[in-house]
Image (cartoon, rainbow, N blue to C red):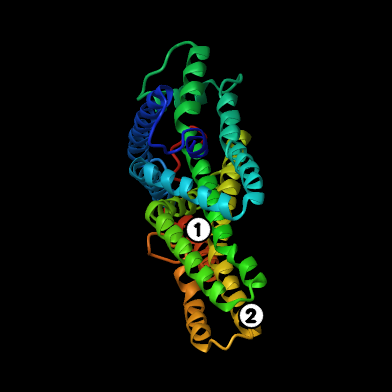
Amino acid sequence: MFYFVALIFPLKEKHTQCQQLLKPCLEYGATLLLSLYIIGDFRNLYQLIGFLPMGLIFSSLFTDIFSITIRVTLLFKREAILCTLVYLQDIHSGLQTNKFLNQVSQLAIGMLVSYILPGTLMWYTVTMCFPGYEPVLKHYVKYTFYGLSTENKWADCFLFVTTDHLLETQQHILSGFLIVLCWYILGLLKEIVESFSAIAQGEEDMPRFFDAYLRYSKIVSCSILRVEQSLSLLLLFLYGFLVFSIFSVTTYLMTAELSKVPTPMVTSQLVLLFVSIIGFYVTSFQAIAVHNVAVKVRNSIYKMVSRSNSYNYDTKSLLLTMASNFPSGVVVTAWGLFSLKNSFLQKTTSGMITYATLLSQLGDQGIYRHVFK
C-alpha cells in the first residue's frame, strides 16, 4: 500500500480532482479498517483468559498488545513514513539510478510473499467446511460472532470464511507488509550510505573530496533522522509482535496434544512460526547492514587519505576525525532503546530461545479447554 501511494500518488503541491478524492478515501478507509481490527484484538484478549496455559496466555496477550500498538502507531505515523519513503526514493534515484528498477522488482516480490501466511490460514479456515468438522465450525462461528450461529452449515461456513479472511488474517498481512516496508526503506538507506564508497575510490583531489564528503554526510544525517523519526517506534513494536508471535507458536506446539489437533491447524502454526522467524531476521539483517556499510565508508575514506599526496594536513586530519565518528551516527535504532548492530542478533537469538523454553513450562499442560481436547 505504501509503495503504490508513494509512486502513484506522490506528494505534490497540486493534485488532480481524482487524486483529491482518492487520498481522503484511502486515509479514512485505512483508519476505519485499522480501528475495526483494534476492536477485534481487544475482544480476543478478553476471550483468551482461562482457555490456555499460562505461558501461552502471556505470549498471546503480548502478541495482541503489540498488534494493537502497531496499528495505532501506523495511524499516527503513516504520513511521516510516506514522506520518508518519497524522500529516500528521490535521493536514491539521483545517486544510484541503475539499481532502482531492481529495488522495485524486489519490493513487488516481497509483497507477494506477504500473502503466503494468510493463504495458509485461509486454507485452514476452508477445511472447517469439510464433512466431519461441523462441531469445530460451530465453535468458531460462535467464537467469532459473540455466541451467535445459524442452523445451516453452509451459511455458517460462508460467514466464518468471509469474516476470518477479511478481518483476522489481515493481522498477518499487515505485519508482512510492514516487514517488506521496513526492509525496502532500510535498503534504500543502506545504498544511500554506501554510495560514497565509489566516490572515495575514484577521487584524488583532497579539497573536492572534502567538499563531497560534507554534502554526503549532510544527506546521510538527514536520511537517518527521517528514518528514526518515522520508523523507529514502528520497528520496536514490529519486533515485539514478531518475537511474541514466535513465543506464542512455540509454546502452543510444545504444550498442545498435537495428535488431537487437525493437521491443517498444525501446518498453519508451523507456517506462522517460519514466517515470523524469517521476518525477524530479514528486518534485522537489513537494519544491521546500514551500520556495516557506514563502517565500509569510513574505511574507504581512510584508504583515500592514506594514498593522497596532498600536503594539506589540516584537511586530512579533520577528514579522518569526522570519518572515525561517522559509523556511530549511522545506526538504526528501535526508538532509541537498542541499536541494531551485529551484537543485536547474538543477544536476541539466545534470549528468544531461553524465554521460549521458560514460557512453555508456565501453567498446567492439561488445562486446554478447547474444541480439540
For the residue pair 4 and 221, the one nearer the viewer reads as 221
Which residue is pictured at 39% across the width and 51% down the height?
230
Is residue 340 visible in the rendered structure shown here? no
Residue under label 1? 356
Dot placed on the residue nearer the N-terminal end, 2 or 1: 2
Whole-number angstrom distance, CA of label 2 to CA of label 1: 46 Å
Is residue 226 visible in the rendered structure shown here? yes
Label 2: which secondary element: helix
For the residue pair 310 and 51, the one nearer the viewer reads as 310
Inspect the image, locate mark 1, and give the three-letter code of the amino acid beneath it.
Ala
- Between circles 2 and 1, the one closer to the viewer is 2
The x and y percentages for residue 328 are 46, 73
Left or right side of 131 for 47: left
For the residue pair 233 and 370, the one nearer the viewer reads as 233
Residue under label 2? 303
Which residue is pictured at 35% across the width and 25% down the height?
146
Which residue is pictured at 53% across the width and 13% down the height?
154
* 228 vs 367: above or below: below
The x and y percentages for residue 373 are 51, 36
* 13 vs 240: above or below: above
Which residue is pictured at 62% across the width and 75% down the height?
300
Q: Does the residue at mark 2 contact the one at mark 1 (Cβ under 8 Å)?
A: no
For the residue pair 263 and 364, the one nearer the viewer reads as 263
Dot 1, crowdedness within 10 Å: few (<14), some or many (≥20)? Answer: many
The x and y percentages for residue 222 are 42, 60
Dot 2, crowdedness within 10 Å: few (<14), some or many (≥20)? Answer: few
The x and y percentages for residue 341 are 52, 68
